[in-house]
Image (cartoon, grey):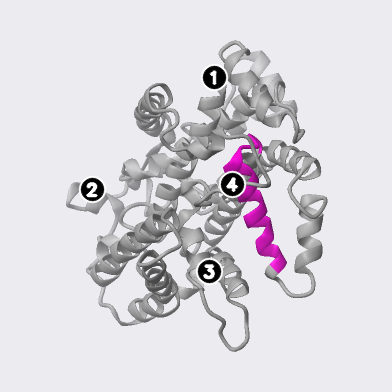
Amino acid sequence: MSFPWAKHYEPKQPLMKWLDERLPLPRLVYNAIGAGYPVPRNLNYFWNFGVLSGAALGIQIITGIILAMHYAANGGIAFDSVEHIMRDVNSGWLLRYAHSNGASFFFIVVYLHIFRGLFYGSYKAPREMVWLLGLVIFLLMMATAFMGYVLPWGQMSFWGAKVITGLFGAIPVVGTPIQTWLLGGFAPDDAALNRFFSLHYLLPFVIAAVIVLHIWSLHIPGSNNPTGVDVKGPQDTVPFHPYYTAKDGFGLGVFLIIYCLVLFFAPNYLGHPDNYIPANPLSTPAHIVPEWYFWPFYAILRAFTFNVFGIPAKLLGVIAMFGSILLLFFLPWLDKSPVRSGNYRPTFKKFFWLLVIDVLILGYCGGSPAAEPFVMISQLAAAYYFAHFLIILPIVSRMERPLPLPNSITEAVLGHATPTA
């Protein structure tokens, strides 16, 4: 979206003029995150999570590069190299805990970012590409996190790799070759560890590149806002800097305080104790679980315990697990409501909170043993998850009667319209 009232970058110093003519990087920054980018004036703190996601990625890249200098991707010494980092490398314990807990905090802010987009309709036109690129980032995050979880080569790392890569074996015809190609053999070993380490190192930079596209696509239509009403004029916006840089700075400070509290006082709280036992192919853990941020999808995978029309339960679980994410790519076309914000959609709001509760239940069941009543609860919760997007949301979007929308963002903020200057 073009904002005619936006400020334009005009370098005044000779050096900056020279640079702007040859490499207009200051102009790009000014128009992207400076006073040259007008933003709706009513953004709340739920719009902080995009910046927090970028900060979390930065923490992961910096700590990951340093950790890679001391890690050995070899099945015989991978576990010992992690212990070497923890015990012998200067501040190695801090780097390792910052990286492992940073992954959890990255997923926390991304999940909040996604659910904010679901509630406020940030996936609706003209921001479909913003939403789709965000989901690509999410998929890349999941792949990166899974490969990173394997690298410590503890018990849960080894068996997690065996179970998750074994899912590909359920795919007819091509499944077993794909599994063998991923592992570099028939079981997790040195080849798999080298593959996962290489990709784990590479993918964060791919994520950073897609984030650039994500931000670029956002700047074309402009940011959504809690009302879902389009910007009508300069009275509806404020410059990104200093208003939202200050607001994002405050949010970042709160995020770092909570992050540091976990990092220094409960660094192992979000991990699994079995991963401090060296990998042993001859000893299967009593309860194999992935990291907590995969639990909802793991619960959907385990919800299928019987064959349907001759299709194996394992294959159905794999299809459902991947389908639960791919389904989100079609969300802009499943929700036909002309109103974006859930604040003005009373029926949608109720079902949204039911979805949040449903995902939390799936997460709880995914981290629980594969036994009753957790399996049955997982089946019911998985059924509701798909019903929400495929049945409930399309029906609600056509039948509900939204509340009256404000005429402008200014009216929503001030309670009355302000004439355009």
Q: Residue furthest bottom?
A: 309
- What amino acid type is highlighted by mark number 1? Trp
Whether tag 4 and tag 2 are in contact, CB under 8 A, the answer is no
Residue at the (82%, 52%) spot, across then down: 185
Q: Type of residue at label 2?
A: Val
Q: How far apart in space, not on screen, are marks 1 and 2 (Cα)?
A: 48 Å
Q: Nearer the viewer, mark 4 or mark 2?
A: 4
Residue indicated by mark 4: 141
Q: Are marks 1 and 2 in contact (CB under 8 Å)?
A: no
Give the numbered dot on residue 413. Answer: 2
Give the spatial CA distance, label 3 vs label 1: 39 Å
- As measured in the structure, the alpha-carbon distance from the residue carrying label 4 to the one carrying label 1 is 23 Å
Residue at 56 percent across and 70 percent down: it is 317
Task: Please state the extent of the stretch shown in magenta in the rendering.
Answer: 151-169
Give residue 393's mark: none
Q: Nearer the viewer, residue 119 or 31?
A: 119
- Residue type, label 4: Met
User: 10 Å neighbourhood of mark 3: few (<14), some, or many (≥20)?
Assistant: some
Q: Which residue is mark 3?
A: 327
Horizontal arrangement in the rendering, residue 48 relative to residue 316 (left or right): left
